[in-house]
Image: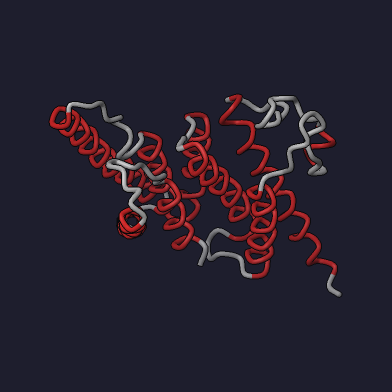
Amino acid sequence: MNVTILVPVFLGWLAGALVNYLADVLPARRRLDQPTCPQCGTQIRWADYWLLRNCRACGRHRSWRTWTTYVLGLVATVQIWLFPPRGLGFVLGFILLVYLATVFIIDVEHRLILHPVSVFGALLGLAIGIILHGTASTLIGGAAGFGIMFILYYFGVLFARMMSRRRGETIEEGDALGFGDVNLAGILGLLLGWPLIWIGLLTAILAGGAVSLMLILGMLALKRYRVFTAIPYAPFLILSAVFLLYR
């Protein structure tokens, strides 16, 4: 047995633990802190948290997301260890994987992209982008990603206001697209550079539209359709970037 394979296995498990911790703590506390049980709010002992034990107060089991993140983190880390993405290599690919997975999970569960997370992502994206594409392509890509998504965000705000007046009811202006998605598009623009950000955004928009259509058809079939049902958009942006970067 090649013992070196134990290195990515350990790092993959570590990645799953870190992503789970950040996704558990940051949306609730907005800072790195001791985790709490989402059911009863009791602080979880560090040993219990890292050893994946049930809550001592209410007995709540760890969520399916926790286990899924560990498994996918392990599989993805072993994959990029054996087949490092071109340009990124293993180390940068691993760090970026942890960041993108954290943003993905938090947005799916809370429809939220925190500003400190975006700031960290911008610094990471700038560093990786310059290594991959050079300074000019990185900065233009970041500006293009942010600008294009900002235009879409603004059109979404105008549409929400128009429909609010027509329907006589309040529609949240961020339902169409949140400003966190605008920041994320800028970060991905730094990572992908110019002109690859165009392909990244187009892929995300098409994928998001296709999934939205399927959800609408499913809700209509089940007679549960609600107008302006919001879906998290960051996962489509992230999956598009992963597809382009991890080749």
Number of marks present in the image shown: 0
Residue furthest to the bottom in view is 1
Left/right placement of residue 149 relative to residue 180 reads left
* On screen, residue 101 above or below 244: above
Q: What is the quadrant of residue 89 in the picture?
A: bottom right
Q: Which quadrant: the N terminus?
A: bottom right
Q: Position of residue 178 (x, y in %)?
A: 36, 36
Q: Residue 187 in the image: x percent, y percent?
A: 43, 43
Which residue is located at x 23 percent, y 35 percent? 154
The one nearer the camera, 2 or 100, is 100
Q: How is the image coloured?
A: secondary structure
Q: Residue at x 74, y 42 (%)?
A: 61
Q: Nearer the viewer, residue 161 or 226?
A: 226
The residue under the point 36% across, 44% down is: 142
In this picture, residue 42 sits left or right of residue 2: left
Q: Residue at x 67, y 45 (%)?
A: 63
**Residue furthest to the front:** 223
Tell me which corner region of the image, top left, top right, bottom left or bottom right, holds residue 182: top left
Q: Quadrant of residue 167?
A: top left
Q: Estimate the x, y position of residue 209 in percent, counting from the top left.
A: 30, 56
Question: In this rendering, is residue 116 above or below 145?
Answer: above
Tell me where residue 128 appears, x and y as whole percent.
51, 49
Q: Quick check: can you spot residue 199?
A: no
Q: Is residue 223 visible?
A: yes
Q: Image height check: is 204 above or below 176? A: below
Above/below status of 14 relative to 217 = above
Image check: 198 left or right of 126?
left
